[in-house]
Image (spheres, rainbow, N blue to C red):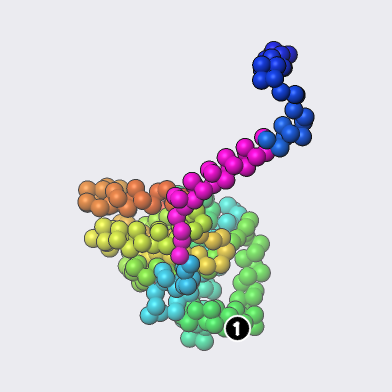
Amino acid sequence: MAPRLCSISAAARRLLGGPRPGRRVVAAVAAARFYSKDNEGSWFRSLFVHKVDPRKDAHSTLLSKKETSNLYKIQFHNVKPECLDAYNSLTEAVLPKLHLDEDYPCSLVGNWNTWYGEQDQAVHLWRFSGGYPALMDCMNKLKNNKEYLEFRKERSQMLLSRRNQLLLEFSFWNEPQPRAGPNIYELRTYKLKPGTMIEWGNNWARAIKYRQENQEAVGGFFSQIGELYVVHHLWAYKDLQSREETRNAAWRKRGWDENVYYTVPLVRHMESRIMIPLKISPLQ
């Protein structure tokens, strides 16, 4: 195929009657054409570029509650299967003391074992009233709390791994309040595409009204430290059948489908946990 192309090129040059151009000339012409075409395309594409106005506020300022300065910490503890009962007993003996001690600016929001999802897992949600200063105050006091240090040492022998995140609550969600049981809880975790948190918040600020008739909406949070662009929605149901009926009812409400349509493209990964509260959990 290559020789035929070369012979055609030579015949064409003879018809034109011009000398054979050198390699440098050919390269220069090709570069000029490429440069012209690329610039033309770039100029054309620039007509359709959406210009974004610079924001002067952080996501945390735009999305979180202004009237409170609550900071939340969520902990995920993966427990050795043979140690789960001992872990729960140890947790129930120690953590309520921190919750009730007024010297510690922290309170338990909820404590659970994962029922469906990652097995042999404990989830703890804490509230620090006063934001980051309250968190640091609590951490500094715990360094000198001998009982808590012994608790951590004993607990470490029961764990396979652990991780945590610091969270703020969305301004349009209910603040988590103690509730009577028995209930099951669903923690739905959404890992968003970077840069989409504002869009997520705008859509859910309108959509949350479709999910409050049965008092199932417990709390909504977004990460500040730890893995970023992560959202947690916490729901409460009487049982799995109640969950199914409540979720199906939302689809019969005009507007809910639009929320799903506009938020699904923002998600990189999503996960659902069904959790059972521990005896010490304020959310029963």
User: Percent x, y for residue 103?
Assistant: 52, 87
159, 39: nearer the viewer: 39
The vertical placement of 24 against 252, above or below, is above
148, 29: nearer the viewer: 29
Please name the residue shown 75% across and 24% down the image.
20
The answer to whether residue 15 of the structure is visible from this angle is yes
User: Percent x, y for residue 49?
Assistant: 47, 52
Q: Quadrant of residue 61?
A: bottom left
Image: magenta residue range: 30-53
Is 52 in the magenta? Answer: yes
Does residue 121 appear to the left or right of 26 in the view shown?
left
Is 266 in the magenta? Answer: no
User: Percent x, y for residue 156?
Assistant: 65, 64
Q: Residues within 10 Å of mark 1 (few under 14, many from 20)?
A: few
Residue type pointed to by label 1? Lys
Q: Which residue is mark 1?
A: 141
Quadrant, the C terminus: bottom left
Please name the residue shown 45% across and 77% down the image.
70
The vertical placement of 135 against 42, above or below, is below
Q: Quadrant of residue 158?
A: bottom right
Q: Main secondary structure of the magenta part?
A: helix
Residue furthest to the front in view is 17
User: Percent x, y for residue 13?
Assistant: 69, 19
